[in-house]
């Protein structure tokens, strides 16, 4: 998908990413790019900076619970048992 590839390429060099409310913010969070959002209904709200005045020194968030919550909202128990969730997010493991 060319659009997804372009987004991931742009995120590789990004200092941060700014969104009003976009599911693209999930890609930024998963890539470790600090995000700034302005809408409480944004899917990345829990792990996002909210004050654009801090863009030079964005806060970092523990993404563990957020990614668990996101996965549980999108995957079935069978997906988990079959390892599909693990496989999907393995590419984002930075350790």
Image (cartoon, rainbow, N blue to C red):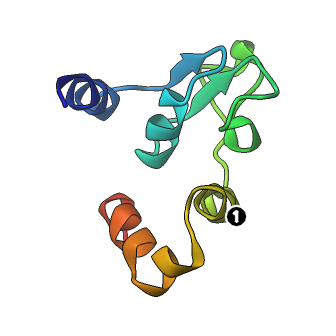
Q: Is residue 43 above or below residue 86?
A: above
Instruction: Check disc 1 and report the residue beneath it.
Output: 65
Q: Nearer the viewer, residue 94 or 92?
A: 92
* Farthest right residue in view: 40
Residue 15 point in image, percent of width and height: 44, 26
* Farthest left residue in view: 2
The residue at 23%/29% (across/down) is 9
Q: Is residue 58 above or below residue 55?
A: below
Quadrant of the image for the N terminus? Answer: top left
How dense is the environment of label 1, judged by Cα within 10 Å: few (below 14), some, or many (20 and up)? few
Q: Secondary structure at mark 1?
A: helix
Residue 57 point in image, percent of width and height: 62, 28
Residue 82 point in image, percent of width and height: 40, 84
Residue 22 lies in what quarter of the image?
A: top right
Quadrant of the image for the C terminus? Answer: bottom left
The residue at 82%/27% (across/down) is 40
Q: Nearer the viewer, residue 80 or 39?
A: 80
Badge count: 1
Describe residue 53's horizontal placement relative to residue 68 as left or right: right
Residue 74 point in image, percent of width and height: 58, 56
Q: Nearer the viewer, residue 77 or 35?
A: 77
Q: Nearer the viewer, residue 83 or 33?
A: 83
Residue 27 lies in what quarter of the image?
A: top left
Describe residue 48's horizontal placement relative to residue 41 as left or right: left
Residue 68 lies in what quarter of the image?
A: bottom right
Please indicate, yes or no, whether residue 29 appears anywhere in the rendered image: yes
């Amino acid at each position: 998908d060319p659009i997804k590839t372009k987004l991931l390429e742009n995120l590789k060099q990004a200092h941060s990413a700014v969104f009003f409310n976009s599911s693209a913010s999930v890609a930024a969070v998963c890539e470790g790019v600090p995000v700034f959002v302005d809408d409480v209904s944004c899917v990345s709200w829990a792990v996002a900076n909210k004050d654009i005045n801090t863009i030079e020194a964005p806060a970092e968030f523990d993404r563990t619970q957020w990614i668990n919550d996101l996965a549980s909202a999108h995957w079935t128990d069978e997906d988990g048992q079959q390892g599909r969730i693990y496989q999907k997010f393995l590419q984002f493991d930075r350790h």
